[in-house]
Image: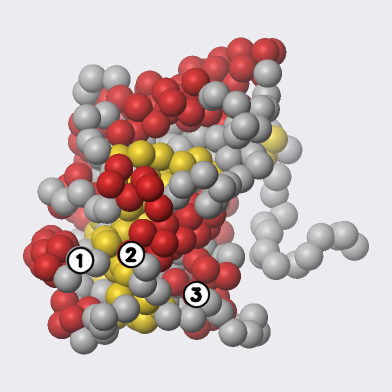
Amino acid sequence: MSKLFQNYKRAQIEFVQAEGNYLVDQQGQRYLDFSSGIGVTNLGFHPEVVHALQQQAAHIWHTPNLYHNQLQEEVAEKLIGDKDYVALFCNSGTEANEAAIKLARKATGKQSIITFKQSFHGRTYGAMSATGQDKIKQGFGEGVPHFHYAQFNEIESVKALITEDTAAVMLELIQGESGIIPAQPEFVHNLAALCKAHDILLIVDEVQTGMGRTGKLFSFEHYGIEPDIFTLAKGLGNGVPVGAMLGKSELSPAFDYGSHGSTFGGNKLAMAASSATLDVMLAPGFLAHTLQKGNDLKAQLTKQLKGHEHVIEVRGLGNMIGIETTLNINDVVEAARAQGLIVLTAGTNVIRLLPPLALSQTEIEQGVRILVEVLS
Ligand SMILES: *Cc1c(COP(=O)(O)O)cnc(C)c1O
């Protein structure tokens, strides 16, 4: 009997090796990975990241945040570019969102935060309370108060929840866990204007959509907005646990000395991996190329699944793609795996694809062929 809590449903297969965009199991079977470990290994198994980690491990792994950390400065600079943010590092998506929630409350002196139905922000009490799905909260008692849930893509439902005490609105620009549901551009523009008019902070959870997933470093770049606060994790270290919360520099005084912290946050191994990951992503033309690859994958799926009786819609942006289907999604995941393709589910009826960003033409064709077959 396993000595582990049974809070996951694990397939009886173990990956023991990664090779580029492929995974190898203990039997030596190879699988094309269209999941990136749930949107984490966005570069696949990448030699530059491996090299950076090996180099760093040979020198020093960890220093606490009591000392200057040049790698944190470097990663922050790479993330921010010429924008006007400051960064704080942590270890996961849920922690990044905790930091965002704390910063929003402290900077505004207000408590209420509007989030959205069907959203997902993490599993710790603050982020869980921000999450607009009852099933995530079942059995855990009272959450953090003052979260209110609006209808995604409905600006009137946001307006109806605004009070004197509203500190922030927080959203995913493409809801990931609940089914790859993109925010409409008009909704996002109206939301940004609404927040500005009412002095409400706009928080974008980029934990899944960030780090090149949608073909830009951050998905908000597609919408032509700049949130007051945004959060990262999953793809930031290409598999090394790390998260980040970025806020406009005018919010910086709210997180003054002693206000927040983390023992591991921004540790040297995590920063070495993040820095190398960003070097690959920010190389000229890389992200544009991945956007084209993602568009190509979606176009091929759309074309080949068109009019298909079990397929309702193919949607998404860049390499974040959902296939809404009438089939049992767990059966589809298993059937794809049996043919050597790893995919994910989202919500109740969506096959979620989060492939590595730089798929080759051959890999796209292989993935599409298997998906078309198992959805038949
Ligand atoms: C995965 C995810 C989180 C939680 O990240 P963890 O690292 O698992 O804590 C938060 N928000 C979004 C949008 C996510 O996809």
Label 2 – label 1 distance at C-alpha: 9 Å
155 vs 58, left or right, is left
Say if 158 sits above or below 229 in the image.
below
**Image coloring type:** secondary structure
Between disc 3 and disc 1, whose residue precedes?
3
Give the crowd class for mark 3: few <14, some 14-19, many >=20 residues within 10 Å: many
- What count of labels does the image hold? 3
Q: Are marks 2 and 3 in contact (CB under 8 Å)?
A: no
Q: Secondary structure at mark 1?
A: loop
Identify the residue at image location x=67%, y=64%: 8
Mark 2 and mark 1 lie on one chain; the one further toward the N terminus is 2
Q: What is the three-letter code of the residue carrying label 1?
A: Asp
Q: Amino acid at mark 3?
A: Ser
Report whether 263 appears left or right of 261.
right
For label 3, the residue is 129
Residue 349 in view (yes/no): no
Separation of disc 3 and disc 1 at Cα? 23 Å
Q: Is residue 43 left or right of residue 9?
A: left
Q: Are marks 2 and 1 in contact (CB under 8 Å)?
A: yes
* Residue 293 position in % (x across, y down): 26, 36
Q: Which residue is mark 2?
A: 108
Rendered view: 150 above or below 225: below
Q: Who's the residue at 49% across and 74% down the image?
A: 129
Q: Describe the element under mark 2 as helix, strand or loop.
A: helix
In the rendered image, which residue does mark 1 sit on? 199
Q: Secondary structure at mark 3?
A: helix
Mark 2, Cα crowd under 10 Å, few <14 / some 14-19 / many 20+, is some
